[in-house]
Amino acid sequence: MARRVSNRRKTLVTIVAWAVGIAIFFPILWTILTSFKTEAEAIASPPKFLFFDWTLENYAEVNSRSNYFLHFMNSVIISVGSTLLGLAIAIPAAWSMAFVPGKRTKDVLMWMLSTKMLPPVGVLIPIYLLFRDSGLLDTRLGLVIVLTLINLPIIVWMLFTYFKEIPGEILEAARMDGAGLWEEVVHVLTPMAVPGIASTLLLNIILAWNEAFWTLNLTAAKAAPLTAFIASYSSPEGLFYAKLSAASTLAIAPILVLGWFSQKQLVRGLTFGAVK
Amino acid sequence: MATAHSRVAARFMISPAVLLLLGWMIVPLSMTIYFSFLSYNLLMPGMEEFIGFTNYRFFLTDPAFFAALANTLLLVGGVLVITIVGGTALALLLDQPFWGQGIVRILVIAPFFVMPTVSALVWKNMFMNPVNGLFAHLAKAIGLEPFDFLAHAPLASIILIVAWQWLPFATLILLTALQSLDQEQLEASEMDGANFGNRFIYIVLPHMARAITVVVLIQTIFLLSVFAEILVTTNGGPGYASTNITYLVYAQSLLQFDVGGGSAGGIVAVILANIVAVFLMRMIGKNLEA
């Protein structure tokens, strides 16, 4: 039985909830608005909210003054590349743990999780030196490798919790019909696993896009993704609010959209299935 | 039943992931441990020598370490308090029926998707800047002196920025937990005359206890490693006022090129994180059996 709620109460909750929601969202809204102002209007006192001359010049400036497109593409290549590579390694692993569990499956899963708990500074120096000596510093390949490894436990875990929900009887039936392991994976399992794989892909692209420890420490001008590029605006001479806002808006917009689609997976993925 | 054949295949399929993670963990970590016993500075190559626990002694007795340890605890604790209390309140609010639920929820979770360098710079420049920031404008509008947040309260400002980023995560998970609460139980207690406070303490809170624990543990793991927000706002300063362990190790190894000392600090950070990790793993492991 649904609870009956008086309209007065509902109106009150609506007002409070919207006020709180807008307050939390406000820094993002303000960044988007500022990106359409001129530099003078961006620091005008008192601040202008909506009534200013809307302009797109910052977006043009950001693109022409810096190699914005390069950094954007770096972000795309690094986040998508590390995610696809991670999936290629994790899908067979998660599949075998979900459908052919052994005595030590649980231990393996827990151990994988424990690698995620390793603080990055614990391995910063060796990775930095190994990268320096092998020429991987400031390359996209280097970051793809590191981000694949740091997100692999999350990918395996997410896939595992999804695969666990696929009924094993279907696989047995396929086996009875004479399907080999390969056919089983390609024709039976994959179609059923696609939604779980898609959610994992989405969440992992978001995590990789926003990763800001390794991207800041292992890149310079060439392979820097947007996280590192935006950080260059922290120097005093880069203090242009409108341009910072335009660059920031472009950097967060694609992930904001992806993120809104992945609300549910977020809970599952980031709690390793502990909260569903 | 799995056949022997498929067991072998399964072992084969799992091995790339296991070997890669094993390599990722063991190779660099043993290198860090090895470096931590060396006198090793990148500016003086070829001068490495074994010096036992000297790096640890220096790191652990350095006043900067105590400052960084205190800052790390304050940062983690501060963000946890804000996000758990705020997240619980928000989850209770969003769980009520109201118009536009979907849109408000989207607004509330948005900060989680903003990359750390963007949120830190937006807060630093457009809100906390003592001349042009929105807070300064607000202060002037009501006749107050603008406050230079990052100069006079650097750690508190960083706590605010990081809490803003993590509030959506706490809210989302606590809301998910709240939605699985049995409504009939609540109604029954309401009919028995339990007021909001009683219902919250005796029914809602025990139901959410598990989710709250998960939020605390997972956030702690991530919050111990806060880095980008410090790098782009204060560089750990003024002095060591906003340096956490992660930033201290970074500064020692990549800014001062002291590989030995930085490695010792890195191992200390690993040990601290492991203390938290043990509890988290136990919680998640329990869930795996259920």
Image (cartoon, rainbow, N blue to C red):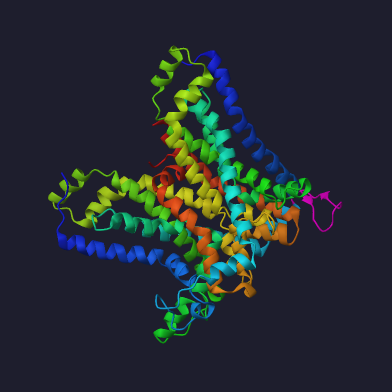
Front residue of A173/B226: it is A173
Q: Is residue A250 above or below residue B238?
A: above
Magenta range is B37-53
Residue A62 is situated, as x and y percent measured from the top left of the image, at: 59, 67
Front residue of B278/B86: it is B86
Residue B141 is situated, as x and y percent measured from the top left of the image, at: 40, 84
Give residue A171's quadrant in the image.
top left
Residue B129 is situated, as x and y percent measured from the top left of the image, at: 52, 76
Quadrant in which the N terminus of chain B is drawn: top left
Q: Is residue B37 above or below residue B59?
A: above
Q: Is residue B42 magenta?
A: yes
Quadrant in which the C terminus of chain B is drawn: top left
- Residue at image x 82%, y 59%? B43
Q: Is residue A189 magenta?
A: no
- Residue A98 located left or right of residue B245: left
Residue A141 is situated, as x and y percent measured from the top left of the image, at: 67, 45
